[in-house]
Amino acid sequence: MANWQATLLNAALTSGSVLVFARDRLDEAEEPKVRSGDTFYGSVPDGDPFGGTFIEVKDGHAMVEVNQQRYHLHRAQHHEAHDDVTIGRPHESWVVG
């Protein structure tokens, strides 16, 4: 299991929200890839913290649980990924909905 830092690029965790996940620590030989059982943490733009767990990850889709609510995610396509956001380390972009 790995721990990820989540950056929410929208005002709230709702359908269409983009989440960018970057690994806390990463060995140089390791490619970052979310997996079932991984955990994440971050904060919404107003500063409230949130965290969750990847319940299932398969074929570009995932189910996560945040505050006892489950959300379906899909891997962001190029037009959804907000590549202009500077994360500074390897990351993955996912979209709620």
Image (spheres, rainbow, N blue to C red):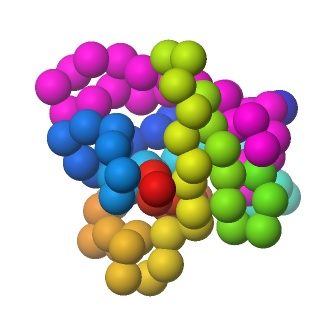
Q: In screen coordinates, is 86 left or right of 91?
A: left
Above or below residue 62? Residue 68 is above
Instruction: Give the image location of residue 57, x and y in percent.
Output: 76, 51
Residue at (66% x, 44% y) in the render: 63
Position of the N terminus by quadrant:
top right
Residue at (33% x, 44% y) in the render: 14
Of 20 and 61, the residue lying toward us: 61
Instruction: Give the image location of residue 23, x and y in percent.
Output: 62, 42
Q: In screen coordinates, is 55 left or right of 1?
A: left
Magenta residue check for 87: no
Above or below residue 40? Residue 91 is below
Is residue 66 visible in this depiction of the protein? yes
Magenta residue check for 54: yes
Is residue 32 visible in this depiction of the protein? no
Residue at (42% x, 21% y) in the render: 50
Of 11 and 89, the residue lying toward us: 11
Residue at (36% x, 82% y) in the render: 79
Q: In screen coordinates, is 87 left or right of 37?
A: left
Q: Residue furthest bottom?
A: 78
Instruction: Give the image location of residue 86, x and y in percent.
Output: 33, 60
Instruction: Give the image location of residue 58, x and y in percent.
Output: 80, 59
Above or below residue 78? Residue 75 is above
- Number of numbered discs visible in the structure rendering: 0
* Numbered range of the magenta stretch: 33-56
